[in-house]
Image: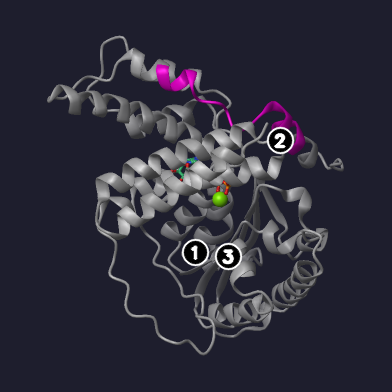
Amino acid sequence: MNNQPTIEAFNSFYRQGMEQYNAGDLAGARSSLLKAAELANKISVGAGSYDVRMEYHRQAAKLLDFIKGPCTHPAPKVPAAKEEESAPEIKPEKGGAITFADVAGLQDVKDQIRYKVLEPLKNPELAAVYKIEPGAKILLYGPPGTGKTFIARAIAGEVDAAFYAVNCQDLISKYMGDSSKKLDALFEKAQDNERAIIFFDEFDSVASRRGDGSDGVDAEMARFVATFLTKVDGFKKSKTNKMLLLIAATNRPWALDPAMLRGGRLDTHIYVGVPDLAARKFLVNKVLKGLPLEDDVDLAKLADALEGYGGGDITAICEKIKLNAYMRSLKAGSAQKISREDCNSVLINSHNMITPADLAKFQKFRSGQSIG
Ligand SMILES: Nc1ncnc2c1ncn2[C@@H]1O[C@H](COP(=O)(O)OP(=O)(O)OP(=O)(O)O)[C@@H](O)[C@H]1O
Ligand SMILES: [Mg+2]
């Protein structure tokens, strides 16, 4: 399928939306960006390759997050650009905005953090009996939109520590030739804190066994991998730091350099899969519970119908259902209840990003089989 016209339309709505946002037209920006998100979703559904599919899925999810978050406030004034002598350093973020209470399911991740970090920090004497030091090196892997990035942020909200978030895709594109230096500086900085979390998102961008075929990227990745391994292997030598939690997230775990995943490195591998019924109910309720609903709208049934969808898609579907009723209300001039038709029209047009073939690929990886 030729996606090119849709990609051009996506780019155009995206540009228009960002211009409107920067000019202070928030309603216009939301409408253009929503259109861009829908187009990204469409491109993603029609894409032949897994990577293109994921890339546009990710774009759609990011746009929806932007529409719900920053796009409800005017754009911050950007100070006049200063000449920078070197690339800016990665600064710790404040945790606390989201916690485990906001995360549906993913009990495995929550448990590991409890046993390896929270409890040893709370009761060091007991941990010492078993020679357990607080900290962990965790790889979160699973299909797109299942909450890997979201739970990493929730961990930052749970653990009182400096949180350094690294978007690996940005790291390698912005600091080409410099990414391993950045990584070096990042570990140094993190070690100055008594407790630190370093989160490598989209880890496959920098830690693949092979790059995209171009020599520059391959060489960059090789340097990054070498620095990462040195830093992780040498970590215990720091005196100031009492706790380091390393988390890496990827939706292409089979692409990672296996050296990253051995014992002592990212050795706790946790699969982040599609939510079970309880988690789907949690997600549906989070968006739709407490809103005006027609009697024939049953949120439990909606959660049931969303079996197999990732948490990001479920949230986006519920947001669209809500938006349908809101748009009808704007036309009617008064609040209209969310109807079955609002739900059905969204469900009919929603294609699940995560296919059975994708799930089978993850299943194969989990059971240690090689992925062709
Ligand atoms: N288990 C969950 N609990 C609560 N919200 C979730 C969950 N899973 C997904 N979401 C919602 O979906 C959005 C997208 O999820 P997120 O970006 O964390 O997925 P991801 O696994 O990191 O995807 P990718 O592999 O594409 O990076 C989140 O911002 C959150 O709103
Ligand atoms: Mg993510």
Q: Residue at x 40, y 85 (%)?
A: 82
x and y percent of residue 194 in the render?
50, 78
Task: Give the distance between the C-alpha atoms of the residues marked 3 and 1, in whole angstroms.
Answer: 38 Å
Checking the image for residue 170, the label placed there is 3
The residue closer to the viewer here, 44 or 106, is: 44
Report crowding for label 1: few under 14, some 14 to 19, many 20 or more residues within 10 A (C-alpha). Answer: few
Residue 37 shows in the view: yes
Q: Which of marks 3 and 1 is nearer the N terminus?
A: 1
| Amino acid carrying mark 2 in the image | Gly
Q: Quick one: quadrant of the C terminus?
A: top right
Of badges 3 and 1, nearer the viewer stands 3
| Amino acid carrying mark 1 in the image | Asn
Q: In this view, does 149 lie to the left or right of 298?
A: right
Q: Quick one: quadrant of the N terminus?
A: top right
Residue 300 shows in the view: no
Instruction: Give the magenta part as a residue range.
Output: 345-362
Q: Confirm if mark 1 falls within 8 A of ligand 1.
A: no
Q: Does the magenta stretch include residue 348?
A: yes
Checking the image for residue 48, the label placed there is 2
